[in-house]
DNA sequence: CGACTTTTTCCACTCAGAGGACAAAGGGGG
DNA sequence: CCCCCTTTGTCCTCTGAGTGGAAAAAGTCG
């Protein structure tokens, strides 16, 4: 099947496509209420979009007291692929044009196996989703990778945790394989876009999205747009110094936030506590699984284990210290906490909040919500779909 | 004399005015090279600007090998007032429409005397400048204040070092007194705008501008635009924790950067060193003046005083620690250091650089210049003039 | 002085878009 | 069930922004 070939011809059409994406099927009248165009002009542009096939008629709308209007919607056959490559897992999802997740596959995988192995996996997952009848093909794909990306070219640069990826032409290679346009970004930025599109950050212009997974990163949104920095490494807060003279970090410095709190650090601390006999709960979980992860710490904490709770609290405090600095600097309207450790839940959140509200000035914290992301593992893939749809729904 | 009443009628005219402001007198042909408009359209818009009086003819341009062209320039009678209110001084300058400083007055003054006293002083300085023949009146004024500002309304909010200013309607009051449009912003943001307009940050899209004066603040520029944050307090880095459990700060916390290094902290440290007999140089300066300031420390350091140099180095290291975090987070293309302590010069700069290059990751620091501002005390007033000219040279 | 450039003006033509008139379609009261 | 009102959709004309070509104006250079 031929996939989406058309692109909006002008800014008006782009605007309309994004409206239909974000608000779902709408009547021309509803569209007219939002786009400040004359009815005639609007009709012309909608007709043109219908001609391209990007938009199709969708029955009658409910009456608003007068003549009933005919709805239009984005082509129901459009499919986007959202790919979220984490340090230890790969998530792949299919969405429709409204970015609703139709199917989602997740697979543990070490990103250090290199781009070739990872993309083989991604392609087979995509094929499985297609085979299950969710999609006949993909009109575009967004890819998130756990490291800095030179955004215009879609190429990872100097990624610390993924050697072998440096300079790999992700965008081009996948575009070739999938036969559709592809955009690549940092996974944290995509999480931020996901939460902005469909999560807690709807309607917030400037916010931070802190993702605590294997490492720690921060998505920065300024005026509704992701800010990526001069070399694409903005938001790389894992190596900000949290504890002067603290633990040695893989980066060569001491006291980096990531060395003191992250999925990896937490697992290590839990292991140590279990082995030293400081926590019966963790020790029994270690005996059962042969290994410990942040999930075990979460479970132990939920079961009331004091050591586990302390580990989370201390980590939250460290994280809160760093976030407090960022809040003073950036003065966001919202801070979202997400990533693998959201399972640690409110213990973590409380520790972070306490520290931020204590350390930052009232003017910056006065009306500052600090909340958990609400999309969980979907945030990344929704953000990825959003990334490519933003691209495709822009004038060529 | 009637002042500038006209405003550009559309985006094209605004664009042209800004080009003339930034590039000086130009021929229509030169303008055409930069604005992607047809010759006819360009001629029409220039003619309209000439009619409004915002732009005037300015003789013949040098020939480029054919018919000589007639230059146009911004009206030479246009005058902007740039006001930079610091914690301990007030600077007022007049500029022409190209934002060249025609006259500059500086006066020590404690901002804590309150808005009424300060503006009395500002108005008398403005009157003096006018009386000296530099201006017949002002077409607009930009005001910088040392604290957070609710930008759209031009009102200081919760300023820590200037009690009595909270909520004072600076914009409205001064607009009334001066009889011209007024815009108000944080002094640090204006310094950043100044360096962007005429200083080291020309042609850099994303950069940080750290101002170390009585306090410490940071201007944030994203894509050529100042970022002010949700409540106008972005860049307030003076109260980021630099030394866990360090010195008590006026804000109620401990270890704030400002408590360890700033004009005020440096003066206090110098005084202590002098009184404890750790520095003969500083002691003699104290005896001579009865007081010490950062200027004395700079002089002592220049004279080779080890204690003074140590004070500067230590302060630079603290500042560098905080900046290193900001660099990791923001990934700027440039860091500008400015403010009263630039007199400390390269000793300070070297300490900051060392710390930042050591602590931030190579991808962020790889091509990151860290430099002193080049406009000195003019940065603030030029930025202020730029602020109001940006406003006036935008469609109404 | 004549050939070639560059700058500026003039003019006809295109096209996006606004906005009014009118037709179509539905709701609700008498 | 009819009539009036409201909302929606279509058609048509008018305006004004903007383009691009032609030609005039004003130089340079050999």
Image: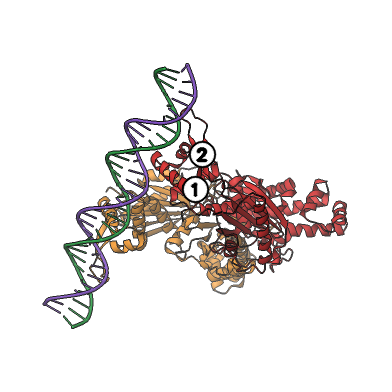
Chain colours: A orange, B red, C green, D purple
Give the percent coordinates (x, y) of residue B49: 46, 47
* Residue A87 x %, y %: 51, 54
Specify the quadrant of the image occupied by residue B200.
top right
> Residue A183's x, y, as percent?
42, 49
Q: Nearer the viewer, residue B132 or B372?
A: B132
Residues at marks 1 and 2, CA–CA distance in whole angstroms: 16 Å
Pinpoint the chain carrying mark 1.
Answer: B
Q: In the rendered image, which residue does mark 2 sit on?
A: B26
For marks 1 and 2, give the one nearer the viewer: 1
* Chain for numbered disc 2: B
Q: Is residue B336 left or right of residue B222?
A: right
Residue at the location (83% across, 46% down)? B303
Left or right placement of residue B182 versus residue B281 in this view:
left
In-front residue for pair A156/A389: A389
Q: What residue is shown with label 1?
A: B53
Q: Is residue A233 visible?
A: yes
User: Where is residue B213, by image quadrant?
Assistant: bottom right
Query: Residue drawn at (28%, 47%), measured in percent from left and top?
Result: A2
Query: Please, is residue B309 above or below residue D2 in the view?
Result: above
Under circle 2, the secondary element is strand
Q: Write down the quadrant of residue A175 in the picture.
A: top left
Neighbourhood count class around disc 2 (C-alpha, 10 Å): few under 14, some 14–19, many 20 upward: many
Query: Tag 2 or tag 1, which sits nearer the N-term?
Result: 2
User: B18 or B68, which is in the foreground?
Assistant: B68
- SS of the residue under disc 1: loop
Which residue is drawn at the image coordinates 53% and 59% (left, top)? Answer: A213
Describe residue A307's horizontal placement relative to residue A209 as left or right: right
């Amino acid at each position: 099947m031929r996939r989406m070939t058309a692109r909006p011809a002008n800014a008006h059409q782009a605007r309309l496509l994004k409206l239909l994406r974000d608000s779902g099927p709408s009547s021309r009248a509803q569209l007219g209420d939002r786009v400040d165009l004359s009815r005639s002009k609007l009709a012309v542009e909608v007709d043109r979009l219908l001609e391209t096939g990007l938009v199709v008629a969708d029955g009658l709308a409910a009456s608003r007291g007068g003549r009933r209007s005919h709805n239009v919607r984005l082509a129901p056959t459009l499919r986007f692929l959202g790919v979220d490559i984490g340090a230890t897992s790969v998530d792949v999802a299919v969405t429709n044009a409204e970015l609703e997740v139709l199917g989602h596959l997740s697979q543990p995988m070490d990103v250090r196996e290199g781009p070739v192995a990872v993309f083989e996996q991604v392609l087979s997952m995509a094929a499985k989703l297609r085979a299950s009848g969710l999609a006949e093909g993909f009109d575009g794909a967004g890819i998130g990778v756990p490291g800095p990306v030179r955004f215009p070219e879609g190429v990872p640069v100097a990624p610390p945790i993924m050697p072998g990826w440096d300079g790999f032409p992700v965008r081009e290679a996948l575009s070739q394989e999938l036969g559709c346009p592809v955009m690549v970004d940092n996974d944290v930025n995509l999480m931020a876009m996901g939460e902005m599109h469909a999560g807690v950050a709807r309607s917030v212009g400037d916010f931070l999205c802190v993702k605590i997974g294997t490492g720690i990163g921060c998505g920065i949104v300024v005026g509704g747009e992701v800010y990526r920095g001069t070399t694409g490494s903005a938001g790389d807060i894992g190596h900000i110094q949290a504890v002067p003279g603290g633990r040695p970090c893989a980066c060569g410095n001491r006291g980096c936030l990531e060395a003191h709190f992250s999925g990896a650090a937490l697992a290590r601390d839990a292991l140590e506590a279990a082995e030293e006999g400081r926590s019966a709960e963790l020790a029994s979980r270690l005996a059962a699984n042969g290994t410990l992860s942040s999930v075990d710490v979460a479970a132990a904490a939920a079961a009331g284990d004091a050591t586990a709770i302390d580990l989370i609290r201390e980590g939250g405090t460290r994280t809160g210290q760093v976030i407090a600095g960022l809040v003073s600097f950036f003065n966001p309207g919202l801070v979202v906490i997400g990533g693998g450790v959201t399972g640690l839940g409110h213990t973590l959140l409380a520790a972070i909040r306490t520290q931020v509200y204590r350390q930052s000035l009232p003017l910056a914290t006065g009306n500052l919500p600090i909340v958990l992301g609400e999309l969980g593992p979907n945030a990344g893939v929704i953000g990825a779909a959003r990334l490519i749809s933003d691209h495709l729904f822009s004038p060529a």
